[in-house]
Image (cartoon, rainbow, N blue to C red):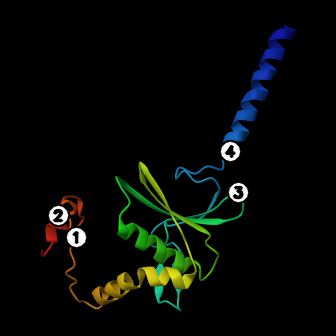
Amino acid sequence: MMMAFLIAFVVFVALLYLAGRRSHRTSSPLGVKGKIIYADQGRKSKLFINRKYGITAKPDFIITTPNGENMMVEYKSRTGRVYQSDIVQLLASVLAARSEMPIHRAVVVTKGTRREIELGSDEHIFREISKFVLLARRAQEGEIIKIFSSHPGVCRTCSVANSCQR
């Protein structure tokens, strides 16, 4: 009888230990260890605004890593590679969020691919994306932007291929 009680007690303690470890897990499904401090949840989510560069954004995720760095994650639910537009979107989000908090690292995650993007100063980031920011502003003003990929294979996976004016 005493042996059965002892075994039951050990099993109970082991289950408590495992449950405790699971509840304190620091790894996100994005492959980044840390605490999610921001997640885009649609309309209700905070909009970050960088007035100096005129950029607004809602990043997908900001995670504080165990060493205290803030890492921004741009998540794409598709499979395949990381596109230049993903990187531009991530960098614009970094600029917007940096108006309120430091962002030390940034990564684009797709199903099967993870690409960390090197960050520099705000000025450096804006120089990298400025031509795309200007195009976006022109499009917001109603101008139809006719810039196409030089690689025709991209058209097969383009999200606006059905309405393309190419």
- Extreme residue in the right direction: 2
Measured Cα–Cα span from mark 1 to mark 3: 40 Å
Q: Look at the picture and state if 45 lies above or below 6.
A: below
Q: Quadrant of residue 132?
A: bottom left
Local packing at callout 1 (Cα closer than 10 Å; few below 14, some 14-19, many 20+) is: few
Q: Which type of secondary structure does the marked residue at label 3 adopt? A: loop
Mark before the other along the chain sequence, 4 or 1? 4
Q: In which quadrant will I find the N terminus? A: top right
Residue type, mark 1 in image:
Ser
Mark before the other along the chain sequence, 4 or 3? 4
Q: Position of residue 144 (x, y in %)?
A: 20, 85
Marks 1,2: beta carbons within 8 A: yes
Marks 1,3: beta carbons within 8 A: no
Q: Look at the picture and state if 85 lies above or below 81.
A: below
- Residue at the disc numbered 1: 149
Residue type, mark 4 in image:
Ser
Measured Cα–Cα span from mark 3 to mark 2: 43 Å
- Residue at the disc numbered 2: 152
Q: Position of residue 162 (x, y in %)?
A: 15, 66
Mark before the other along the chain sequence, 4 or 2? 4
Q: Nearer the viewer, mark 4 or mark 1?
A: 1
Residue type, mark 3 in image:
Pro
Measured Cα–Cα span from mark 4 to mark 1: 46 Å
Measured Cα–Cα span from mark 4 to mark 3: 16 Å
